[in-house]
Image (tube, rainbow, N blue to C red):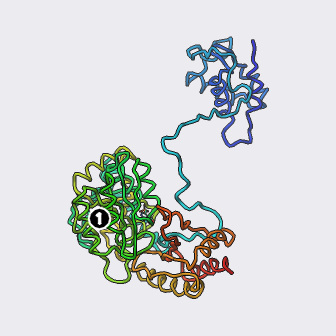
Amino acid sequence: MLRPWQISLSQRIDAARSEPVYMQIIQAVIRDIESGRLTSGSYLPSSRELAASLGVNRKTVVLAYEDLIAQGWLSSAGTRGTMVSTALPDPGLPASRDVAEPDAPAQAEYRFAAAPASPLALPEGPGLKLDEGAPDGRLFPIELLSRAYRAAAQRLTRRNGLQYRDPRGAPALRESVAEMLKSQRGLPVTADNICITRGSQNSIFLAASLLIRPGDAVIVEELTYEPAVAAFAARGAKIVPVGLDGDGICLDDVEAACRRNRVAAVFVTPHHQFPTTVALRPERRLRLLDLARQFGFAVIEDDYDHEFHFASQPLLPMAAYAPGRVIYAGSLSKLLLPALRVGYIAAPVEVIEALAHVVSLVDGMGNTLTENAAAELIDSGELSRHARKVRQVYAQRREAFAEALDATLGDHVSYEMPPGGLAFWLRFASEQTLDRIEAGAAGAGLRFASSRSFMTRPGAARGLRIGFASLDEQEARRALQALRSILD
Ligand SMILES: Cc1ncc(COP(=O)(O)O)c(C=O)c1O
């Protein structure tokens, strides 16, 4: 009986590896059957022989053989031993393709439908990360969150409520969000107008999936939020950049683009333009809505950090006065924690129902436990208390950041005090200075989003978006000094 296979197996079993030895034997046998090295009907060494040649306990081999027999890979041939099941197809090939390199993974060469782009998130790594406006997670009292989860889990378990449920999200949170949007942001909504999502990015992708047919145009500002653009592009959209000035998106450009393209949507961040932080002026909001009426596109209003507005009363979202034209995306990422992945869409009921279908396709439904815990935090008033507290902290940090900016980079950088949101938009006196800063960042132990990541067309004004909220005052000063050190 020929058993060339035994030798190669002994080379591949290693007790030092983390998988149990019996699992390694199982894998080696299956791989050899799959590759044609072990053919249907061929005999395996006895358990005693194999155990001796591998230097393992015989029981280990017996256990592996028993599992392989139970799974149908091997069969017992009585006193004649153990053989590869004759029910398996015989590859009919001479000991085949992987024989030369028995452990080489058979790597498929997939043709990806969409070429993977460069990573959108800042890679984790050494050095200080300057984000684009993240909250300081250290300020959130984590015991509140644990309590909310505990209460939600107890309540839901009693009702057998942790089952497959409505793709639009947990009813309790849809109610709480609708109430909050109605009372604090003026949106004329009920829970039927709300779909809970896994954050604004998820909302954008869901809306894109619903609205965009390949080849449709999506209008974006020449400086905007790259992951949103990438989501539209992934849906086959033609990205049409338009101008942007100190009052927001340029509507003459939007109108001209609508005359030349079949526009499915216009993506805006009207409250705090990303990345420049400016608020979209009321007259421009009205004209954008007029154009939406005229050309039939949807306005995707990404109100990603609505809760933080320092200069005056926050402006009402466009969805408050044109709910039929706007798909409104909000999030708890900035107020609570990005890692919770809780966001929401407010839109007309038909849109929400259609979105529910997309959610069913993507991930079935949301995270019921997290959504109910978030509802607990809203309904108990804890979230509002937290909002009041962090608003004060961030307001101070905003002032301190501006002072530190003036002191460290004042001769190279200009900025407007951001009226809201959690980041500054920094313009540089010369492109060369910006280039030097970007080139020297890693060496100075800093990581931040590239100025080019915001640009949707060449020639847009480059700048850096630097968050001020996630760093305390000392950390922020150190970060700015590190930026400065690149120039010195
Ligand atoms: C403009 C903009 N939209 C969307 C998002 C995504 O946020 P979320 O965590 O809610 O997905 C961000 C995150 O910073 C953002 O800045």
Q: Which residue is mark 1?
A: 177
Q: What residue is drawn where x is 27% and y is 58%?
A: 194
| Residue toward you, 15 or 214 | 214
Q: What residue is drawn where x is 44% and y is 49%?
A: 234
Classed neighbour count for the residue bearing mark 1: other residues with Cα under 10 Å, few (<14), some (14–19), many (≥20):
many
| Residue toward you, 362 or 428 | 428
Residue 173 visible, this orientation: no
As displayed, is residue 284 above or below residue 63? below
- Which percent across, then down, holds residue 28? 67, 29
As displayed, is residue 268 above or below residue 387? above
Q: Does residue 323 appear to the left or right of 487 in the view shown?
A: left
Give the quarter of the image for residue 409. bottom right
Residue 177 visible, this orientation: yes
Q: Amino acid at mark 1?
A: Val
Q: State the quadrant of the N terminus.
A: top right
- Which percent across, then down, holds residue 188? 20, 66
